[in-house]
Image (cartoon, rainbow, N blue to C red):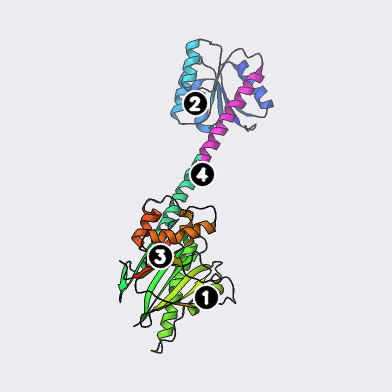
Amino acid sequence: MHKTSATLLLIDDDEVVRASIAAYLEDSGFNILLASNGLQGLEVFERERPDLVICDLRMPQVDGLELIRRINALEACAPIIVVSGAGVMTDVVEALRLGAADYLIKPLEDLAVLEHSVHRALDRVHLRQENERYREKLETANRELQASLHLLQEDQNAGRQVQMNMLPVTPWEDEGLSFAHQIIPSLYLSGDFVDYFRVDEHRVAFYLADVSGHGASSAFVTVLLKFMTTRLLYESRRNGMLPEFKPSDVLGHINRGLINCKLGKHVTMLGGVIDEQTNRLTYSIGGHLPLPVMYTGGQAYYLEGRGLPVGLFKEADYTNLEIDLPESFSLTLLSDGILDLLAGDNLQEKEALLPKLVSEAGGTLDGLRSVFGLASLAEMPDDIALLVLSRNLA
């Protein structure tokens, strides 16, 4: 770890001692600078900046203790080893207090002891310098990390604002129908999304989507979903005459779009259109669980349906299902993150419990918030989305 080619400054007014120590350390591979007194040694030190100093304590003009003080004042990191015949304990204590790396007593019967002390002092300096470099690198990396986190936070804030602005108003009432939703992201951004909008004068459409994965990449897909559904609605209206806006066609359109984008993401979806003239709900399911829960007359039950996830299979085919809507009802759509809140050892037990909880909640979003304890949730492994549409619900 030490440098065998290190430069050492040897300061001693005894020429014989100076020569013998210099010869030994040069044989050991060190470069040796010589000075015969403290003042000369200080001049050599300031000019050459050696890696280590070996000095006597009792010297004319500037003694060893004063030399240590002056070198310390230069804020140099070179260690100082005192080699002195003045073995007074107060001198030893003062030299070590001032920062001397070691204190050896003359005469040195074995110069290997001095060489070992030199190596040890140089090793300590090397370690201190390495630690300083590591600390500086760590501080630099920490500053860069903080800057990156700040940018990431800004990006997340912007992404969250975009996502929140895309969501529909909640609650929203139109022609006797009431819509309300809540999304609880497991991370800052959500891969769950809901939307509802008027198709024409007598039809209202809605959907709930659960994008695979979490975070920013999944949230981006929710932006794409909003774009694709809005674009499809716009294209359908271009000729001034809106054709059938079937949920199965919407899911098929999104399926093709996601596959063509090659994002490596798929979506499970529930989509529906309510025709207010015929009082019928047409809906389609794209690989989504749990199924929609209908609540009417104090009873809750699942709607039927099945289908492939959206964005996985080119040849996926989606089916439209139709039901007549009760005069008074609520329809609850949930993402599968809600299942993490339910008791049960397996999926079947959890799904069997869900209609009972919707019934206990009275089919309302506020009731569901209370039943599921949404106000006091800790960290969740998955996003949670709830969409409740209702009519004449007491």
Q: Residues within 10 Å of mark 2 (few under 14, many from 20)?
A: many
Q: Position of residue 33 (x, y in %)?
A: 59, 27
Residue 257 numbered tag: 1
Which region is colored magenta? 106-134
Check disc 3 and report the residue beneath it: 299
Assess whether mark 2 and mark 3 are in contact (beta carbons under 8 angstroms): no
Q: Residues within 10 Å of mark 3 (few under 14, many from 20)?
A: some
Q: Secondary structure at mark 4?
A: helix
Q: Nearer the viewer, residue 347 or 22?
A: 347
* Dominant secondary structure, magenta: helix
Look at label 2 and name its amino acid.
Leu
Which is closer to the viewer, label 1 or label 3?
3
Check disc 2 and report the residue beneath it: 42
Look at label 4 and name its amino acid.
Lys
Q: Earlier in the sequence, mark 3 or mark 4?
A: 4
Cα–Cα span, label 4 and label 1:
46 Å
Q: Secondary structure at mark 2?
A: helix
Assess whether mark 3 and mark 1 are in contact (beta carbons under 8 angstroms): no
Cα–Cα span, label 4 and label 2:
33 Å
